[in-house]
Image (spheres, helix red, strand yellow):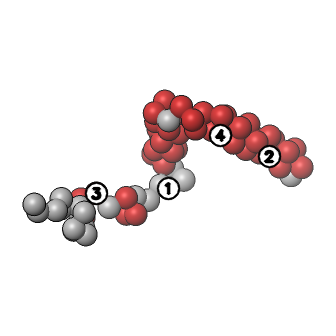
């Protein structure tokens, strides 16, 4: 039986996720938000982590905003 192409160590350059660059532009924001939404919907176990990290990040952002205002 021949091994599956990916199990044999074959590289697929069309699926190289390390080449994805998320910039600080509106397009990067869309990509980042879409990834969070896909994780929230697709991985139910990740929901508490995503909610808690969003809350902590928002709180830290507000604190830094008020401090440097």
- What kind of element bears circle 4? helix
Is 19 on the left-hand or right-hand side of 7?
A: right
The numbered mark, 1 or 4, whose residue comes first in the sequence reads 1
Mark 1 / mark 3, whichever is N-terminal: 3
At x 11%, y 62%, the residue is: 2
The quarter holding residue 51 reads top right
Residue designated by label 3? 15
Label disc, if present, on residue 23 of the rendered structure: 1
Residue at position x 47%, y 55% from top?
22
Q: Are marks 1 and 3 in contact (CB under 8 Å)?
A: no
Q: Which mark is residue 65?
A: none
Mark 2 vs mark 3, CA separation in Å: 35 Å
- Label 1: which secondary element: loop
Mark in front: 2 vs 1: 2
- What residue is drawn where x is 63% and y is 38%? 50
First reached walking from the N terminus: tag 4 or tag 2: 4
Q: Which residue is mark 4?
A: 49
Q: CA distance from mark 2 to mark 1?
A: 22 Å
Q: Which one is closest to the eye, mark 4 or mark 2? A: 4
- Which residue does the image show at 54% across and 53% down from the upper left? 24
Q: Nearer the viewer, mark 3 or mark 4?
A: 4
Q: Residue 32, can we see it?
A: yes
């Amino acid at each position: 039986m021949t091994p599956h192409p990916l199990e044999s160590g074959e590289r697929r350059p069309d699926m190289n996720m390390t080449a994805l660059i998320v910039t600080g532009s509106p397009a990067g924001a869309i990509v980042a938000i879409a990834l969070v939404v896909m994780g929230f919907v697709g991985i139910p176990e990740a929901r508490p982590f995503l909610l808690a990290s969003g809350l902590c990040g928002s709180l830290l952002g507000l604190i830094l905003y008020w401090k440097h205002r």
